Image: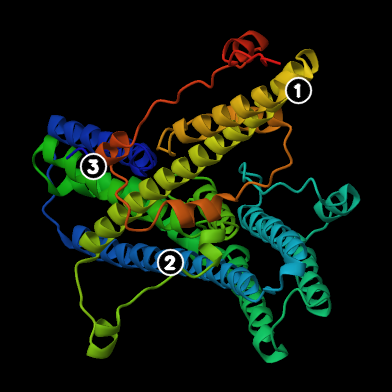
Amino acid sequence: IGFAFRWHGSVLPKALLWGVPSGLLALGLKLYLNHLEISFENFAVSQAWASYNAMLAFLVVFRTTNAYGRYWEGATNLRQVRGEWFGATSSLFAFCSRDPSKQEDVLKFQHRLVRLMSMLWVTALEQLADKDLGFDVADISGFAPESIAWVRQQDDKCEVILQWIQNTVIRHIDSQVLDVPPPIITRVFQELSRGRVGLEQVQTIIDVRFPFPYAQMMAFALVANTFILPVLCAEVIDSAGWCFGITVVSVTALWGVNYTAAELENPFEDDYNDLPLPDYCKSMNTSLERLLDQTCTQSPEFCISEADMNKRRVKYSPWSAANYAAKRQAVANSSKRLARNAIAVRARYMRSRLVKSRSTTSTQHTECEATLDMDEVGHSRSNLARSMTNLESELPTPYCEVIGVAEWEGNKGASGSEEKLPTLEEEVATEVPEDKDTSQAALLDEHVTEPKPKKITKKSVRKKEPEPQLSTA
């Protein structure tokens, strides 16, 4: 019931503007005839008018059917245009060169193509709507302002932007950015041209209106029915209430169907019953932006065991269950990768601390050596070597403790050593094997505290010296 009487987007308000006055006219005539006690027993006129109403209803329904056909054709062709142009863009992304030396040119071409295609789609929608409905376009600040200003002044902007896209494709074929054979690249131009043809078919629906003589005669017949039907209902219906109700329903229904046909004949305006052009624009921009994601443009890795490969059969499972299992596996792999990276970062951090400790101990050893006597140098050197050996044996093994990158970089710079540390990938490969348990409990078991290296001073070195033995001579 709520749907039947919803006013937003409905044609009932406009139809009731004709039906209610007609019903009131029928009610007034019926009450006047009852007051004069006049009755009509000739049903010939009423039967002829019933036949007229049947013919009028057929004409109105025919117009509505034709209007719905135009509406459906416009929606179908517009979606086809979107599919052709997006397919051409996707093909160009797939045809890009895989040469590492040309990756910068490839990325620049892809960004330029996405912006040109977004401009093409937005101008096509503006051309159909014949007004600016607030369509969003990709960032075009990288193009020359003079070119953008010039294309905005043209009557058919789609022709100009489509020519820009074709010229861009040809230029990048010459520069080997699009590294495919010419017979394959021709499918891109075919898709672009088919999209343009589909746009012209959609434009035909807008330009070719419903025939004016047909619409005019229907409007005249409906107006005549609005004023004549109350008179006939007042003559043949005894009850004043039924006279009012039947007149209102009949007139409102005919005018409502006629207004429905008028709403559907042009589906590219900004009414409630028209096509959602802003949503179409947003959907196209989202699809184009998705192409720039590296995960979308590269095929995913695939692993299969030799046993499954020899079976020559494929196991099937519900898509929802397979998607859930893949999601859980992706989360597990991500957690494992983060744990391994944390272990590798911690290992590099601890090695940097070792280098820093060695550098600090060497500096202190030099200061002590400058102040001690030459007889004491040998003893101090042996003590320092013994301290360094103890320090290296006391340093803990790497454990999984996530530290800040800034702390690691600071310790790396403070060491002042030119010792080359292993890369992150080398440490992950050597210190964290694939079958290592990276659960939280296992990682916490490996946690050990780091002892601070003892500072060797002049006093401590002298304190540990043996007493010199005097010669009896």
What residue would you read off at disc 2? Answer: 72
Element under disc 2: helix
What residue would you read off at disc 1? Answer: 366
What residue would you read off at disc 3? Answer: 3
Q: CA distance from mark 2 to mark 3?
A: 23 Å
Can you say whether 308 is above or below 245 in the image? below
Q: Nearer the viewer, residue 46 or 203?
A: 203
Kindly identify the amino acid type of the residue bearing the numbered disc 1: Thr
Residue drawn at x 67%, y 11% as measured from the top left:
458
Q: Which quadrant does the N terminus fall into?
A: top left
Q: Residues within 10 Å of mark 3 (few under 14, many from 20)?
A: few
Q: Is residue 256 visible?
A: no
Kindly identify the amino acid type of the residue bearing the numbered disc 3: Phe
Q: Quadrant of residue 242?
A: top left
Element under disc 3: loop
Q: Is residue 361 visible?
A: yes
Discs 1/3, front: 1
* Image-based side of 193 in relation to 257, left or right: right
Q: Nearer the viewer, residue 77 or 148?
A: 148
Can you say whether 461 is above or below 339 in the image? above
